[in-house]
Amino acid sequence: MKKFFKILMLLVLVSSTITAQVPAATIPEFKFSRYNETVFANKDLPPGKMIFFIFFDPGCDHCQRAITYLNQHVSEFRKAAIYLITIDVKEKTDRFFATYGNSLKKQKNITVLRDFQNDFISKFRPRKYPSLFLYSPQKKLILYDDEEKNMVKFLSYVKGKA
């Protein structure tokens, strides 16, 4: 019984730590990979623009809805530099964009990145998929959410109406 209680307490402690994870308040140092396999790091972020990171999994239905929304409203997000980040393989990601975001890869303000070293999870501290991070031009967190239904909030901030 004593052992069971210790295990239960450990599980409660671990789960409360996970749910209490706080998203990065400023953009941390990172290195991701562009589609052409070149490195993309902090120094590559454009100055003076809002930065919108979307951490997604191609198999996640919530991510599919978030990317569909972005695809439908892509012209309204033009004031932000948008980075779509996944840990998945290129083939699966390509199929995902062909289905849910066919116009996104053509946009100048959108870059698809792959995170082979799981840097995003450890440094940005997302809670679940999709994780949506909007940072100011000063690289400070404006808005975080992990519900695709709240993409409209991000659009309001990008358009300057929030």
Image (cartoon, rainbow, N blue to C red):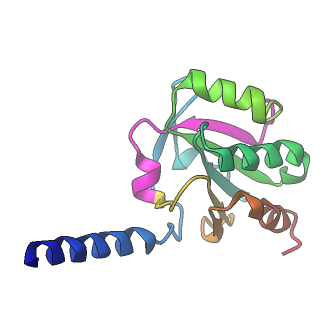
Q: Name the spot of residue 7 as percent of width and height, x first.
A: 18, 70
14 relative position to 33: left or right: left
Q: Residue furthest front?
A: 1
Give the total number of marks visible in the rendering.
Answer: 0
Examine the structure image and report whether residue 111 is included in the region drawn in magenta. yes
User: Which residue: 51% across, 27% down?
Assistant: 89
Q: Which quarter of the rendering shows the N terminus?
A: bottom left
> Which stretch appears magenta?
105-123
Up/down of 98 relative to 57, above or below: above
Up/down of 32 relative to 150, above or below: above
Q: Residue furthest left?
A: 2
Q: Name the spot of residue 32 as percent of width and height, x first.
A: 49, 39
User: Which residue: 85% across, 67% down?
Assistant: 156
134 relative position to 41: left or right: right
Examine the structure image and report whether residue 154 is included in the region drawn in magenta. no
Q: Name the spot of residue 37 as percent of width and height, x first.
A: 51, 24
- Is residue 46 something one can see in this rendering? yes
Q: Name the spot of residue 92 as percent of width and height, x first.
A: 59, 26
Q: Nearer the viewer, residue 3 or 150?
A: 3
Up/down of 156 relative to 75, above or below: below
Q: Which quarter of the rendering shows the C terminus?
A: bottom right
User: Which residue: 60% across, 64% down?
Assistant: 139
User: Which residue: 53% across, 71% down?
Assistant: 25
